[in-house]
Amino acid sequence: MAARAAEGGKVGYFVREIERNDGSTLRIQQCSEGDVGCVVWDAAIVLCKYLETKAFWEPAAGRNEWLQKRVVELGAGTGAAGLMAASLGARVTLTDLPELQHLLHLNMEENRSLVTQGDVRAGELTWGADVTEFQPEPDFILMADCIYYEQSVGPLLKTLRDLAGPHTCVICCYERRTVGRNPAVEQTFFELLLQDFECHEIPLEQQDPEFSSPDIRILHICRKP
Ligand SMILES: C[S@@+](CC[C@H](N)C(=O)[O-])C[C@H]1O[C@@H](n2cnc3c(N)ncnc32)[C@H](O)[C@@H]1O
């Protein structure tokens, strides 16, 4: 991870800018100290830019699928994807482990001026724990780069089962990694997921033309009828 701030091992912050299609910019603070959630992963950028595609948002036609929609982001890390949804008009709850809450709050404040029609808050959610605080069922659940850790596959799926209702669309974006246990973790996740959910992959042509990549997948996941 990025170097610590030079003086006295202090925690340093460094900004990742994500330009929106209207020319405004999300400024996402990343932290030099901490676990994987402290930086913006490529899958989060790809997901951010997908949220702005015409699948959801066509300003010229006056169409905005995000307006006032209830969105919960799981494993939000810096909160980039959820903040993009909030800036497009959604009512977003960013969730992650307790130790990521400070970064989520920092980024909510940093980007508050872009959240004009929607709103954003943050909450602690460890996968597998009680989700009552985040109900009723959201319209969308966002997940960027959350399929990577063997022990958390079961708890993550429990959270999806507990939180997703019959009309919830889970938008899952993740980078396919071929090293180590990654392929096995991915396989286990999808074997278990498909017991209760259906998956539809978004082709590259329907993603942002610049911010997309063959090794980063975007899936729409919904409960089986
Ligand atoms: C690879 S990072 C992705 C962060 C962010 N979504 C992004 O793409 O930039 C995985 C995230 O999942 C969170 N996470 C891992 N295990 C978790 C668990 N058991 N409960 C809740 N969040 C968890 C981590 O704290 C981290 O923020």
Image: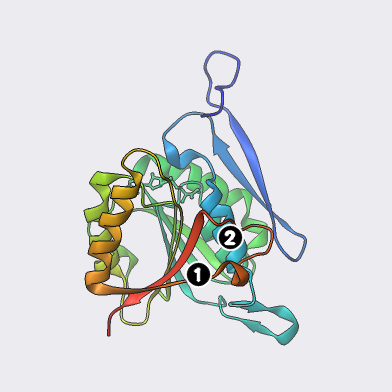
User: Between 163 and 199, which is closer to the camera in this rendering?
Assistant: 199
Are the residues tagged 2 and 1 within 8 Å (C-beta)? Answer: no
Checking the image for residue 91, the label placed there is 1
- Which structural element holds mark 2? helix
Give the SS element for disc 1. strand
From the viewer's perspective, is 207 left or right of 187?
right
Residue situated in front as seen by the camera: 73 or 102: 73
Q: Quadrant of residue 94?
A: bottom left
Mark 1 packing: few (<14 Cα in 10 Å), some, or many (20+)? many
Label count reads 2
Q: Nearer the viewer, mark 2 or mark 1?
A: 2
Residue name at image x 59 percent, y 77 percent: 56
Callout 1, which amino acid? Arg
- Please state which of residues 90 and 16 is positioned toward the viewer in this rendering: 16
Please give the residue where the numbered disc 2 appears in the rendered image.
48
Report x, y in % for residue 169.
41, 75
Give the mark nearer the N terminus: 2 vs 1.
Answer: 2
Residue 156 coordinates in the image, percent (x, y): 28, 56
